[in-house]
Amino acid sequence: MTTTNASVVDSMAHQAGRLCKAKGFHRYLDQAKRTRHGIHHNALPDGSHQLEDATDFIHKACGVQANSEIDHNEKAAHMLRRIITDYRRWQSARGLAQREAMT
């Protein structure tokens, strides 16, 4: 009998990996950086952030060096949940949640 380990599928590390691959999350990071630093859209167009940038952002924000650490660090997991919540709010505000679902 084959069983699946739901904790692996739904792990915070797995969620971080999916988030970092999401093109919508890359655009979210573009907009957040423009807003935070007062950068014009022409200087930092949508599509500027890529997988590596998203991964670096998650690791820095969560205080980890690898996604796998998030599963064993409650502070990191809490921060990732906040990031996911903020991203979903951003999607919802733009009507993108259904088209760009992370999950």
Image: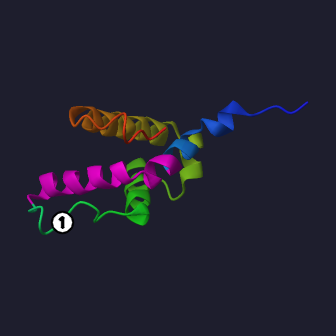
Residue underneath mark 1: 44
Could you say which quadrant of the image residue 92 lies in? top left
Q: Position of residue 60 (x, y in %)?
A: 39, 56
Could you say which quadrant of the image residue 51 lies in? bottom left
- Image side of residue 96 versus residue 45, left or right: right
Q: Residue at x 53, y 45 (%)?
A: 70
- Mark 1 surroundings within 10 Å by alpha-carbon count, few (fewer than 14), some (14 through 19), many (20 or more): some
Q: Residue at x 54, y 52 (%)?
A: 67
- What residue range appears in magenta? 17-38
Question: Residue 96 in magenta?
Answer: no
> How many numbered marks does the figure carry?
1
- Image side of residue 80 versus residue 31, left or right: right
Q: Position of residue 69 (x, y in %)?
A: 57, 49
Q: Residue at x 43, y 41 (%)?
A: 80
The N terminus, quarter of image: top right
Callout 1 secondary element? loop
